[in-house]
């Protein structure tokens, strides 16, 4: 019999260590715990007990998610782990049940996570809502085109000097793109701990001297030359982002620059005279999203101009969501009209931020098409200008 309850603060560290062991990592050291404990929110850290012993844990932190045309309250789910000697007997299922029920009680329409494995979370209604890519560039062979955006100034700071600036730049400049989430103080101190001491920060200021972008990067010497790993690069506009890349690709003695967790639509290759110098070496899962309250979640985003479409949603894990929804540019309502499209709630999550169009998921067999005319309308409703991207680990 598995019992799930919210843990007391005094139990957080053992939950964290259990999570780390599940990820095959050693227990947390005292100083690292000091930087980590702030992420644990009382009431949102769950423990699953089997025979009175802690067998698994999952937590969520209160956050917001940018969706097309707006923001929605979203719990950021993390710290999910089950003891290796207690797996495959329903511990995670019990934790997911308690966590999604709690999110519903809090009135949080969306839950989100980064998944360790792609096969775990769909059964609980999560769908892959955004993806990111990795890019690798040989510095000596990169030349920026004359028409690539240019302007402002980049200055280099060490982490201690930069940390007072970055949260504010992030808050002001990185807001609209679907998939963006908030970064609180605890997140930034966790980031500091995660990064090595060799990390540096480049800050971009626009023509008026206002800071509007930053890159956190780490030069790493190795046998094949020196690589700069770009861990985090965000900017208010294309000029800030292009200028930061120009800076990183211009650092002396560097052989290779690797951008991790970059948005799929970043136009880096289009800024170069030879686009093949920017090698995309990986496209991977970014954010998984769960629509906890389908009506509220659908209402939180905007839609393109098209005829409304009636969509039937199936949701075995949270059956209150099941039924028809009329989705149109003027809003979303529950509907008892004959559905034109039918899909699982996890597939709706794939559409939610605009990463995939309905027509793609019809072709994939993930959406049942009852009225073919509805597919083109659904594409126009769900399409977004920017590709979704979270780019924030948690
Ligand atoms: C957001 C994050 O924190 S991601 C990090 C997730 N944690 C990890 O990857 C750490 C290592 N793994 C673990 O701790 C565990 O194996 C977990 C958390 C992935 C799964 O926990 P369990 O208690 O074994 O899962 P549980 O027994 O409740 O299984 C529920 C269902 O998921 C399936 N499942 C569980 N783990 C996996 C997996 N890794 N791959 C595929 N299916 C899985 C089970 O087969 C079961 O399927 P069913 O619904 O068809 O019966």
Image (cartoon, helix red, strand yellow):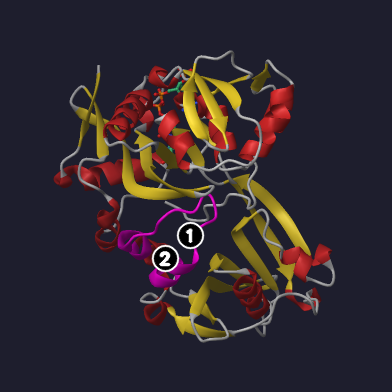
Q: Which residue is mark 2?
A: 171
Instruction: Pick the quarter of the image with the N terminus.
Output: top left
Across and down, in percent, residue 293 comes to 40, 30
**Is residue 268 shown left or right of residue 277?**
left
Is residue 357 at least partly visible in the picture? no
Residue 57: x and y in percent read: 30, 36
Is residue 186 rendered magenta in the image?
Answer: yes
Q: Position of residue 99 (x, y in %)?
A: 32, 32
Vertical order, 247 against 387 (above or below): below
Alpha carbons under labels 1 and 2: distance apart: 7 Å
Residue 9 image position (x, y, % from top left): 16, 46
Q: Tell me, yes or no, whether the two marked residues, 1 and 2, touch with CB atoms within 8 Å.
A: yes
Instruction: Name the element at disc 2.
Output: helix
Residue picked out by circle 1: 175
- Quick check: 201 above or below 93? below
Element class at badge 1:
loop
Q: Quadrant of residue 149?
A: bottom right
Identify which residue is drawn at 73% across, 23% down.
373
Q: Residue at x 79, y 76 (%)?
A: 147
- Position of residue 78 relative to residue 54, above or below, is below
Magenta extent: 167-189
Question: Neighbour class for label 2 at 10 Å: few (<14), some, many (≥20)?
Answer: few
**Which picture quadrant has residue 260?**
bottom right
């Amino acid at each position: 019999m598995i019992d799930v309850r919210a843990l007391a603060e005094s139990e957080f560290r053992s939950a964290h260590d259990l999570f780390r062991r599940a990820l095959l990592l050693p227990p947390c050291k005292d100083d690292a715990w000091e930087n980590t404990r702030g992420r644990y929110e009382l009431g949102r850290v769950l423990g699953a007990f089997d025979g009175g012993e802690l067998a698994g844990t999952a937590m969520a932190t209160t956050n917001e998610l940018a969706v097309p045309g707006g923001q929605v309250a979203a719990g950021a789910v993390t710290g999910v782990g089950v003891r290796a000697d207690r797996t495959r007997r329903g511990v995670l299922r019990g934790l997911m049940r308690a966590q999604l029920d709690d999110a519903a009680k809090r009135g949080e329409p969306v839950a989100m996570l980064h998944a360790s494995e792609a096969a775990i979370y769909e059964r609980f209604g999560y769908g892959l809502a955004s993806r990111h890519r990795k890019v690798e560039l040989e510095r000596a062979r990169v030349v920026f085109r004359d028409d690539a955006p240019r302007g402002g100034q980049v200055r280099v700071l060490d982490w201690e000097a930069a940390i007072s600036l970055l949260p504010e730049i992030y808050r002001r400049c990185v807001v609209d793109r679907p998939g963006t989430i908030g970064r609180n103080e605890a997140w930034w101190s966790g980031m500091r701990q995660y990064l090595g001491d060799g990390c540096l920060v480049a800050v971009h200021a626009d023509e008026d001297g206002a800071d509007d972008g930053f890159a956190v990067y780490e030069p790493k010497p190795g046998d094949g030359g020196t690589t700069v790993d770009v861990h985090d690069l965000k900017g208010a506009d294309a000029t800030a982002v292009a200028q930061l890349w120009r800076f990183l690709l211009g650092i002396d003695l560097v052989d290779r620059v690797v951008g991790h967790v970059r948005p799929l639509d970043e136009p880096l290759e289009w800024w170069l005279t030879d686009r093949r110098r920017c090698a995309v070496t990986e496209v991977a899962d970014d954010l998984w999203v769960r629509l906890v309250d389908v009506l509220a979640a659908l209402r939180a985003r905007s839609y393109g101009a098209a005829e409304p479409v009636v969509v039937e949603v199936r949701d075995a894990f949270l059956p209150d969501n099941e039924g028809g929804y009329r989705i149109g540019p003027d809003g979303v309502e529950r509907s008892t009209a004959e559905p034109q499209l039918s899909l699982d709630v996890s597939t709706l999550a794939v559409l939610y931020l605009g990463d995939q169009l309905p027509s793609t998921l019809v072709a994939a067999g993930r959406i049942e098409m009852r009225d073919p005319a509805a597919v083109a309308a659904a594409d126009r409703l769900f399409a977004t200008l920017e590709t979704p991207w979270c780019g924030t680990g948690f």
